[in-house]
Amino acid sequence: MPTPPRSRSPRTDRPRSRQQDERPRWGMRMATTLSVLVLGAGGVGHAVVTSLDGGIGRVDPFKDMKNRPQAGHGTNILLVGTDGRETITPEEKEKYRLGGAPCHCTDTMMIVHVSADRNRASVVSLPRDSYAEIPEHTDQNTGAHHNQHPVKINAAYAEGGPALTVRTVEHMTGLKMDHYLEVDFTSFMKTVDVLGGVQICTARPMKDSYTGLDLAAGTHELDGGQALQYVRSRHTDGSADLGRMQRQQRFMAALIHKATGSGVLMNPVRFREVASTLLSSVRADQGFGAEEILSLGRTMRGFSPASSEFATVPIGQMSFPVKGIGSTVKWDPAKSRKLFAALREDAPLAQVRGAQDGKGHAPGAMVEVAPDRIRVQVYNGTRTDGLGRRVDDALRATGFRTTGTPMAGGARDLPRTLVEYDPRWDRSARSLAAALPGAELHPVKGLGATLRVTAGTDFRGVTPVRGEVAEGAGEFETVRGDQVVCP
């Protein structure tokens, strides 16, 4: 998807405006930048990366900062996404529903913690509507002095640019930021295209009239524009922002998988092409340059999706009203402090659990609802002794929460296995039926949350399945990259 060359804006902090809630949110463009720059640098020569260093726009987010948190172990990078769209063509804007003026505000914030041994990257999303206390500062737009006051966290950029953003995040998390990286979504589309697209799997059709996303169930190779639709969609179901963040995590993992598995980043010519595309719309602190990128890259050459883990700061209240501000997202104070303490101590957030195949994926076909969230009562609908027990054991081995006490079904040689379910649990029923090929689905109002399987004479076994969104591992509901990429 060709785009015209971008004319670089002055390297100064531009005033930011606010925009309506439906503006796009571009967390993935930041992951694009980090994974390509850090992972790719280890496989190319110093001269190539150094020649690209001049293309990075520079900001000074640490200027005059005092009383900062004490440094921990590893490296913390604050990734900030803006919605710049200056180089996107009118045709692309119409095709990918990108109309309207950019707000020049922060749509997404993430903390990327690279472990001291360079073997792990922990990515923690900070919801943009998070309740925050902005430190005392001078407004960069009006010059007015402000005491500490409550806001949504994305307002820090509008009032004080990168410096106030860093101060606010450090104040809220107690973590010292070592680097700052700011990207707009123009680079996201262009970089996905230069990598040759990214593979995404979905267990059900996904449509969003706001973004134009329209995907059938299955596996898809997304180009830059389609990828942008995928990561910004929040109206595909009732999960809204939670579902959007989960899709972003899957995309980040898929992007790392493509970048590290395709050989592109080990080819100096291809790496230069990818890096040049990225750096046309990146701003970073003065200390985050070619030498730092090379240093990280040399020790992360074995990085893979399994080396990454994704989490969102623990939420205590999804809709916390604040006078004059509106509804905000309030963090869980105890759990969030514990999460940030783990990052400071360089500890992994996820705990490995569950069966994995040889590639690190949870085995089986992808379904909408993970088996361990589905409760099942098994009945034997045939005259075959022990069939109910075999079905119960097979479903339990696949991860379903069976009662463990199969019962007689009252039928004499039911020809086809039957799955009965309350219509309110239709997604769970479809996921269960996927594990029982050929099973008949039958809704029963008032049946409740426990699904009923009556085994028929057609039963030949259970097909392994896995949830579309990996279940949270550990206290912070963290997922590893290899748990959410296509098998």
Image (tube, rainbow, N blue to C red):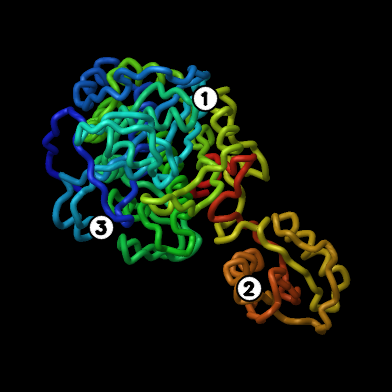
Q: Earlier in the sequence, mark 3 or mark 2?
A: 3
Determine the residue positioned at 27% across, 21% down: 49
Q: Position of residue 431 (x, y in %)?
A: 60, 65
Residue located beneath label 3 in the image: 96
Q: Amino acid at mark 2?
A: Gly
Q: Closer to us: mark 2 or mark 1?
A: 1
Q: Secondary structure at mark 1?
A: loop
In the image, is 303 to the left or to the right of 461?
left
Determine the residue positioned at 80% across, 73% down: 379
Q: Position of residue 45 (x, y in %)?
A: 30, 17
CA gap between label 1 and label 3 equals 37 Å
Q: Position of residue 451 (x, y in %)?
A: 70, 70
Determine the residue positioned at 19% across, 26% down: 55
CA gap between label 3 and label 2 equals 38 Å
- The vertical placement of 484 against 63, above or below, is below
Q: Earlier in the sequence, mark 2 or mark 1?
A: 1
- Of residue 125 and residue 230, the one placed in the foreground of this image is 125
Residue located beneath label 2 in the image: 438
Residue located beneath label 1 in the image: 119
